[in-house]
Amino acid sequence: MALSDADVQKQIKHMMAFIEQEANEKAEEIDAKAEEEFNIEKGRLVQHQRLKIMEYYDRKEKQVELQKKIQSSNMLNQARLKALKVREDHVRNVLDEARKRLGEVTKNRDKYTQLIEKLIIQGLLQLLEPNVLIRSREVDKDIVNAVLPNVAKAYQDVAGKEVNLKLDNDQFLPVDTTGGIELLAQRGKIKISNTLEARLELIAQQIIPDIRVAIFGRNPNRKFDD
């Protein structure tokens, strides 16, 4: 039985409505899947950027903490160095005051003469040379000449050897030398300095730890005193 035009149009409309519905459903499905994939990718990108930001600020925080530690360490070291410098300045002031008072030794002629004699004998026993040149301050040459015979005898008694002593009348110790003598042998190749300044410097190296303790007290963290 042949369909009428009206029936054909009705079926066509029905088919078009079905196709349109299928297309709409498919479009909605595609949109939903695209939205889901978009949200997943957006979440992944956001999380990735969040982690990068967190890592960035974590590094910055660690850098700040490191800078704080370095700055604190530098400031602590500077404070320690300043404290050490102040302590050493105090110790050096004590030694400088001792140097200033060295000249008082020479004011008592008898005691200074005995000191010159002992300093020469000590130097001779270090040298153990048969010919020794004695160098003194120009103002002390009379004292040195006066003690040379006694010194030679004392040296012979101790060392069992004779020694030829001579005062250097061509060259004297610098005028700013407080006192004492120098002994030269082997044409000046060997020299022993027994000036008062040299003796003080030698003693200072030995007593500086005691000076530190006397001024500042004993340091509980110090293992060695030199």
Image: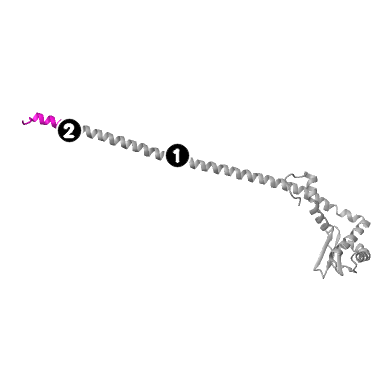
Report which residue position mark 1 lands on: 50
Report which residue position mark 2 lands on: 16
Of mark 2 and mark 1, the one earlier in the sequence is: 2
| SS at circle 2 | helix
Find residue 151 and name its label: none
User: Magenta residues, as a range?
Assistant: 1-18
Pick out the residue farthest to the front: 1
Describe residue 13's horizontal placement relative to residue 168 as left or right. Answer: left
Residue lying at 34% horizontally and 36% vertically, measured from the top left: 36
Residue 149 drawn at (x, y percent)? 93, 66
Amino acid type of the residue tagged 1 in the rendering: Arg
Residue 79 drawn at (x, y percent)? 68, 44
Q: Determine if the magenta segment contains residue 11.
A: yes
Q: Quadrant of the N terminus?
A: top left
Please rate how many residues cluster around mark 2, counting C-alpha atoms within 10 Å: few if below 14, some from 14 to 19, many from 20: few
Q: Nearer the viewer, residue 136 or 150?
A: 150
Q: Which of 169 and 192 is in front in this view?
A: 192
